[in-house]
Amino acid sequence: MSLFQNIVIMILLITAAGFLSLTEIALAGARKVKLKILAEAGDERAQKVLDLQAQSADFFAASQIGLNAVAILGGILGEGAFRPYFFTFVSRFYTGPWAETISFSLSFTLVTSLFILFADLMPKRLAMIAPEKIAVAVINPIQIFIVICKPLAWVINALANLLFRLFKINTIRDDNITFDDISAVMDAGAQAGVLQKQEHHFIENVFELEERNVPSSMTTRENVVYFTLKESEESIRQKLADYPYSKFLVCNENIDEVIGYVDTKDILVRILNNQKINQLNESTIRNVLTIPDTLTLSELLDRFRSSKEKFAVVINEYALVVGVITLSDIMITVMGDWVTPIEEDQQIIKRDNNSWLIDGSTPIEDMKHALAIDEMPDDDNYETLAGFMMYKLRKIPRPADIVIFGGYKFEVVDVDHFKIDQLLVTRLLEEQTAPTENEDN
């Protein structure tokens, strides 16, 4: 054959190999989520791609048969086609015994380079740019190719399956999407500008409902405002004026003797009807939902939905009231600054780029977001920043006690009756980081 004919054959072989490489990467890299969207929009080719991904053994066998056959054929034809021309070229400068070897090496290098560049590297890089679009475009011709290679592919797959079973290798693809997968997609969207910072935070908070316990969002025991059965009308009016709550607990004599709760709308009705509001009875006191403090926020949402309630009392294992929580508290946890009133006291106040004033009752998850800390040590043992300090110090903290962790110094600033009111958190430079994690002063 002439040089022109050899070049045409090599171009056809390289094109075939490039098509198979492009198809292999596109079909393997096409994301199911996007393919399902295309399929639901009516694109039958997208459904074919999904079916092929579910049963990909025949495709990969056919692809490898085609790629290897073309590569071997290309090597044989290319070496025979170009070596004489390289020999003639080399003979102009060198006529020794190595001339034949040099010609073969140059021919081999040329053919190999052409296949690597045009049949492997470039097609695969192109397929990675838009795998779904390319997979949908090539699915019909590749299915014909799979049918052609079916007999040989069946033999190869049978041998491969035998070896997999022999070495006990699981070949079932795991398509479960985890939170880490979704988080990675959200991070990519945030970096690309598709998601705003607030939206990214909101989506993360939704998934964290499964991990965060009720105490991380509830109103703690010492901050619960409640009425007693013997509460005076003047006291009730004063509490209604001082606290903008829509629901108040009703207790017998102390907070641990919960009877139910009253809705301020019912009290307003009594006021409009000129009735005394301190005569709390069955007509105004409603049954209250009681939940353990071990529930997650996700489980509490299910309780609220099933009971049609939006208010619950949280008790511990000793049947003592540790706080109350409402549906609004959960929404504030999820939405953050979107629903938190601006005038409300902030639990985390940024003083500068390297220091924060943080309330001791701040949930650990909120602190992790603010300080960009991925993990806290043994975080199953505490819910708040105050709990973290007590866990690390192994004692009741005092002012000026510090804990150093994750490149930050946590210093107790104010303690009120053994309760940590406020901490100063400072980012440490590398040379300032102490070798120990806590220090007592």
Image: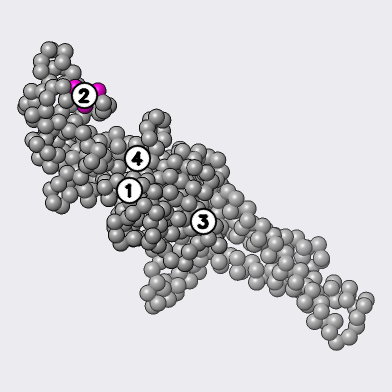
Q: Secondary structure at mark 1?
A: strand
Q: Nearer the viewer, mark 1 or mark 3?
A: 1
- Contact between marks 1 and 4 (CB within 8 A): the answer is no
Residue 171: percent from the left, percent from the top? 40, 66
Q: Residues within 10 Å of mark 2 (few under 14, many from 20)?
A: few
Q: Amino acid at mark 2?
A: Gln
Q: Which residues are magenta?
A: 236-241
Q: Is residue 239 magenta?
A: yes
Q: Nearer the viewer, mark 1 or mark 4?
A: 1
Q: Amino acid at mark 1?
A: Val
User: Distance between the Cα atoms at labels 2 and 4?
Assistant: 29 Å
Going from the N terminus, do you reach mark 4 or mark 3 first?
Answer: 4
Q: Nearer the viewer, residue 197 or 46?
A: 197
Residue 53: percent from the left, percent from the top? 45, 56
Q: Nearer the viewer, mark 2 or mark 1?
A: 1
Q: Is residue 168 left or right of residue 125?
A: left
Q: Secondary structure at mark 2?
A: helix
Residue under label 4, please give it. Answer: 333
User: What residue is at 22 percent from the left and 51 percent from the top?
Assistant: 294
Residue under label 3, please give it. Answer: 428
Residue under label 2, please give it. Answer: 238
Q: Is residue 254 magenta?
A: no
User: Distance between the Cα atoms at labels 1 and 4?
Assistant: 26 Å
Q: Is residue 371 left or right of residue 318?
A: right
Residue 339: percent from the left, percent from the top? 38, 32
Going from the N terminus, do you reach mark 1 or mark 3 first?
Answer: 1
Residue under label 1, please give it. Answer: 415
Going from the N terminus, do you reach mark 2 or mark 4 first?
Answer: 2
- Contact between marks 2 and 1 (CB within 8 A): the answer is no
Q: From what the image shows, is residue 9 above or below residue 399?
A: below
